[in-house]
Structure formats: structure tokens, C-alpha cells
Image (cartoon, rainbow, N blue to C red):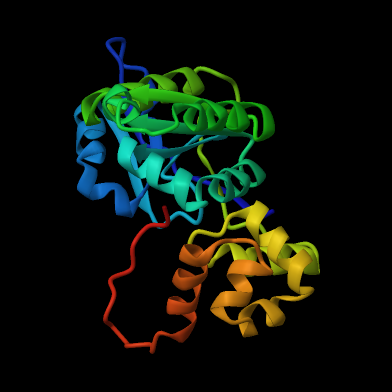
Amino acid sequence: MNISPILSDSLLTDRTGKEMPLTRIVIDDRELSSGIPDLLRRKSVYVQLKRLDVGDYVIGEHAVERKTVRDFITSLYGGRLFDQARRLSQAYKNPVLLVEGDIQEVLADLRNPRVYWGTLLALALNFDFNVFFTLDAEQTADFLHILASKTRGRAGQIRPLLVKKPRMATTKDWQLALLESLPTIGPILAEKLLLSFGSVRNVVRASKVELAVKGGIGMARAKKIQDVLDAGYRRGEQKQTKLG
């Protein structure tokens, strides 16, 4: 795992004239539009914008993935949430999921709320995730500021540790990662497809019907996969966006 600390310190002066390091948070640059980096700067937080491989905010050994409630539900049903949780927990010692928005409003629209509770339990028990909820960007900024302040008070935890995307250790890791990059396919379905077809190449060669029936993923998922595999590439057509 490739880890690089932020080496330079920014200082402020307290009432006695003693220099002290600013509270520091490294933020994925795709979070700018959320307004949270500006809110943190107003709280005298030293913000460093970088393109992060995993996570949205890095605070010491904590990595925070922020999702709106709609993003959270979409990634849950789309199969991406557990893949993201796995990668974040592999990369950082203390992974945190922060869900922003009115979760009660979304829960009222869910046909099966038990899926939601099952997801929270799986994140906590299987991935050792801490899950928190905020109502809006202001509360999110407050949460991050407090977390950074608490972390800063611990010896050796001032500088954020940036972790690059974990390297794949085995052929199986690469096989699963390739299939998990397909739409609506998470780690469970990726392994199911490999068990059904024997190799990644066989999965890619399979027809829509074969994916749906033999792969056991259903026609809707099979169609999305086929659409991506068959689509022509158009340079510069799509703007790069953050995963999930």
C-alpha cells in the first residue's frame, strides 16, 4: 500500500504568541461544488485539494466518503456501495461513511426499508465502517471540523495520510475488480459471474440472455452491461465524474 503524508505544516499563532499547526483536511477536488471546502475554510481549517483515489476527505488515518441520501440509496441498489466500502476499508485504517440529507424522507419512499437496515449492519460488521448522518452541508462541515480537531489532538495524527489506490495482489483480485467496474455489479455478483462463466473473457463474450439466465443477474442488469460493452467510444464526450 502506498502511503504519503502531507509534509508541510501551516501555522497559526495563539493568544500567547505560540505557533500551532492549523487543523488540516485533504479534500477530493470533485467536492468543490458541494460548498463544504469553503465552509471549512471559514472555520479556519487548512484545506488541501487533491484528486483522491478513494474517499472524499482524509483526516489523519480517517477517510470519509460523503454521499447524499439519494446517492446512498442509488449506490446501494446499483451494487456500487459495498465495492466502495471494500476499497476504502482496504486503503484506510478508519473508514467513515457520511450520509447527508433527510434520510427519513427517503426511507418513506422505500418499498423495503429492511434493505436499508441490513446495509447499515453489513457496513458496520463486515467492513468496520462508522456511519454518520447530517442534514446539510453546514452540518457536514461541522462534523468534519470536529473530527479533524479530535484527530489533531492525538500524537502522530496531525498530518493526513494519503493512500493511493490499493494494488491488486492476486489474479482473483484483478478478475473481481474488472467485473465490479461494470454497471450494477458489486463484489457478490462479480464472483457469481466468475463462478458461472469461469473467466472474465467468457463473461464479456456472453450474450444478454446468457448473462441474465446462466449468470443469474436478471435481464435489466444484463442489458446495462451489454449497452456499455457495445457502446462506441467518443473522445471528450463525457466529463470525468466521481465514482458513486
User: Is residue 229 positioned above or below 23 on the image?
Assistant: below
Q: How many marks?
A: 0
Pick whichever, 139 or 199, lies toward us: 199
Task: Using residue 172 as the reference point, say whether residue 233 is left or right of it.
Answer: left
Pick whichever, 127 or 189, lies toward us: 189
**Residue 167, can we see it?**
no
Q: Residue at x 37, y 57 (%)?
A: 242
Task: Using residue 113 as the reference point, say whether residue 199 is left or right of it.
Answer: right
Q: Position of residue 138 (x, y in %)?
A: 22, 26
**Residue 170, can we see it?**
yes
Q: Residue at x 57, y 76 (%)?
A: 209
Q: Quadrant of residue 88?
A: top right
Q: Position of residue 13 (x, y in %)?
A: 30, 22
User: Is residue 2 positioned above or below 45 on the image?
Assistant: below
Q: Quadrant of residue 18?
A: top left
Q: Position of residue 9 (x, y in %)?
A: 42, 38
Pick whichever, 91 or 217, lies toward us: 217
Q: Residue at x 66, y 66 (%)?
A: 215
Q: Position of residue 222 (x, y in %)?
A: 52, 69
Q: Residue at x 63, y 81 (%)?
A: 206
User: Is residue 135 positioned above or below 3 on the image?
Assistant: above
Pick whichever, 115 or 13, lies toward us: 115
Task: Using residue 55 as the reference point, say whether residue 1 is left or right of it.
Answer: right
